[in-house]
Amino acid sequence: MLINVVAGVITLFFTALLTIAGVGAAFILIPIFIALGIDVHVAMATALLLNSIAMIFASHRFIKKKLVLWKVAVPILIAATVASPVGAYISTDLNREILLWLFVIFLIFAASMMLFYRPVQRVRDISKTKQILSGVLVGIFAGFMGGLLGVGGGNFIVPVLVWLGYNPKKASATTSFIVIFSSFSGFLGHMTVGNISVPLLSFTAIGSALGAVAGAWLMTEKLKRNQVKYIIGFVLLVIAIKMVWNLLA
């Protein structure tokens, strides 16, 4: 019982922070759940389902605030769904450790861009056709790289959209919507080898929903565009540090 309560509180905190950045909390929650003594397959399945739950609540607010770029989000979803299995297939013949080190380099570069680079916000000058095309290209890139490395595509989508000139809040909100489907797809895959603990899911789902609502409120009402960009950069840097730790352990 105590472990489930602790897991719920931890889920609330990290979900609130990462909702602002537009990425799911699964990459942090999985190792924390495992450290709490939860079975690895249960931890992975639960964390991915929590991603979807959190982003559903967050996206509800983002959609009401008209922050989701539909002409970009839908093409990304479709393209990423097609490209992800291709990346996963190719990864079987490549050295995964080298690929992960390359991903770390990308994350550090992307984090630096978020923290120090000030892109010109060009979205108003982008036609509908170009928005759709950029969505397809970003989706192919994120889906392929996500499948190749076995990581969430949202880590690629947010920095690339910001680099292309999209408002960081809209980039984050758009990615949050996409994470609903990508995480649920991953959850279904892990459900084949792991069960869900109902008590654990109950407490963490409450924490996930509350954290997502809090994070979405902070992002839309309290934080400025540049502040959101800095948070995204910080989160990407944390992901890079965690991956380096895992690679060196």
Image (cartoon, rainbow, N blue to C red):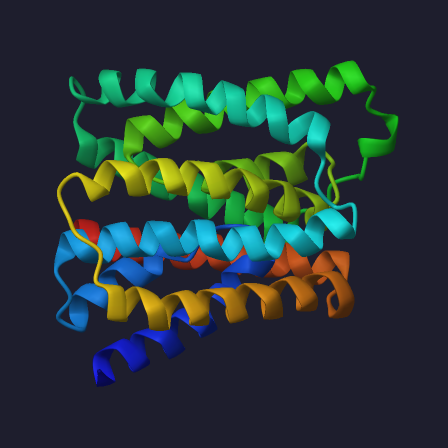
The location of residue 152, given as percent across then percent down, is 39, 40
Do we see residue 249 in this rendering? Answer: no
| Residue 107 in the figure: left or right of residue 218 | left
Q: Looking at the figure, which quarter contains the C terminus? A: bottom left
- When asked about the image quadrant of residue 131, the answer is top right
Q: Looking at the figure, which quarter contains the N terminus? A: bottom left
Q: Is residue 32 above or below residue 46?
A: below
The location of residue 63, given as percent across then percent down, is 72, 47
- Badge count: 0
Q: In this view, does 114 lie above or below 201?
A: above
| Residue 212 in the figure: left or right of residue 185 | right
- When asked about the image quadrant of residue 150, the answer is top left
Outermost residue toward the right in this view: 125
Do we see residue 130 in this rendering? Answer: yes
Outermost residue toward the front in this view: 198
- The foreground one among 137 and 221 is 221
Q: Residue at x 74, y 36 (%)?
A: 165
The location of residue 40, given as percent across then percent down, is 14, 56
Q: Residue at x 16, y 17 (%)?
A: 93
Q: In this view, does 156 lie above or below 60?
A: above
Q: Which residue is drawn at 30% across and 74% down?
A: 7
